[in-house]
Image: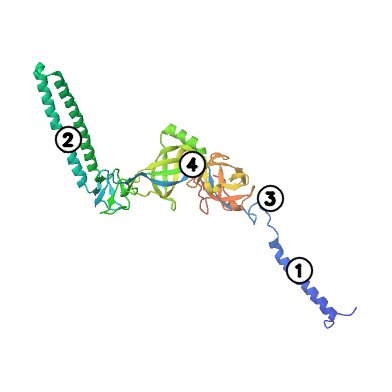
Amino acid sequence: MSSFDLKNPVWRKRAAIAGGLAVAAGLALALWPQAQPAKTGGGRPGGPDGRPVAVVAAQAVRRDMPIYLDAIGTVQAYNTVTVRSRVDGELVEVLFKEGQDVRAGDVLAQIDPRTYRAQYEQAVATRDKDSAQLEAARRDLARYVGLGDRVSGQSVDTQRALVRQLEATVRADEAAASNAKTMLSYTVIAAPIDGRTGMRLVDRGNIVRASDATGLVTLTQVQPISVVFTLPQQSLAAVNERLRQDGRLQVTALQPETRVLADTGELELVDNQIDQTTGTIKLKAVMPNAERKLWPGGFVNVRLLLSVRRDGLVVPAQAVQRGPQGSYVFAVKEDRTVEMRAVKVATVEAGQALLDEGLADGDTVVVEGTAKLQPGARISTGGTNGEGQGGNGNGGQRKGRPDKPQ
């Protein structure tokens, strides 16, 4: 074997290979501690570095919890009337402004009354003429009867028939006069309900007729106002039962964009048929709309207060997780480890979940930090409370040792 000589190509190749192996070994040794998983303290799973997972926890508490049925509703005017003329004639006056609030009986428009006033006066004159003839016939009948045998019975009967005939004529005249008076009154068009006027559909000077379909203006009653919404037919039994017990159910309307309260009213109607195509039932609520936040044709979020669960078991809604097997929570055990516990959620309201099954009063659940947890993981908390808010950074725990569940 030849002696070591860097000028020799063979030794130069061997030296380069040895240097490369040395560099690779050094890099592997430097990276080895980071590639190895950290050992968990005490054999219990924790965070990536083996320490307990920091979480925020809360206790399950008892409180009254409202149960709502939610739906999308449509606002409708409580009453809507298209004001039309009941007689034919020229529209001589329009006495309302578009968008004006009017009361029932307020005059909205005037039809030219001259023709109808003349017809009424003519009917009255005819009635007065026939009434005078009736009075004369009655006086003649009284004289005939007073003359006794000096007047034939046929004359008396004839006069009595004439009186009855004139009485019928006068009654017909009175009916004609009454009809003419009514037609004259129709020339004054008044508001039939309290409401708000819409856009004017006919201008002054036009000839209007009773057969016109468009009318003069549309009135809508917005105080109170109606909200119509639908619920699944499965909710019908519960709604009817509550109506039978209480007689009334509270309905709340919220603005769809901001969820701000618009108004609160009562359920007025449950429709008498289920829509077979959708499997829903239609309901109507009435709201005072004192501030006019609701307007016909708009959409609102509707909340029907079905009942209030007294002393229901409640946890923060964010503690409830969803999995393939349903809803569950991470419950904290006495040894400061967690377990997955299946729960049955009745409803969620204002960030609180009402539970039917799965937890007991005083059980502690993880509210924040669940993404890092698995069954059996050790945790540390800064304190718990019944409202589901975590404590501060210290939480009263001793250094180096997590405090016990509250």
Where does residue 249 sit, x and y in percent of width and height?
A: 42, 38
Indicate the secondary structure of the residue bearing disc 2.
Answer: helix
The answer to whether the residues at label 4 and label 1 have Cβ atoms under 8 Å apart is no
The Cα atoms of the two marked residues, 4 and 2, are separated by 62 Å
Q: Pointer 3: residues within 10 angstroms few (<14), some, or many (20+)?
A: few
Left or right, residue 71 beside residue 156: right
Going from N to C along the chain, the mark reached first, 3 or 2, is: 3
Going from N to C along the chain, the mark reached first, 4 or 3, is: 3
Kind of residue at disc 4: Leu
Q: Which residue is mark 4?
A: 231
Q: Pointer 1: residues within 10 angstroms few (<14), some, or many (20+)?
A: few
Mark drawn on residue 25: 1
Residue located 20% across and 42% down the image: 119
Q: Quadrant of residue 142?
A: top left
Instruction: Give the label, 4 or 2, closer to the camera.
Output: 2
Where does residue 101 sit, x and y in percent of width and height?
A: 29, 49
Kind of residue at disc 2: Arg
The answer to whether the residues at label 4 and label 2 have Cβ atoms under 8 Å apart is no
Outermost residue, top side? 149
Quarter holding the N terminus is bottom right
The Cα atoms of the two marked residues, 4 and 1, are separated by 71 Å
Kind of residue at disc 1: Ala
Closest to the observer: 312 or 122? 122
Q: Which residue is mark 3?
A: 43
Indicate the secondary structure of the residue bearing disc 4.
Answer: strand
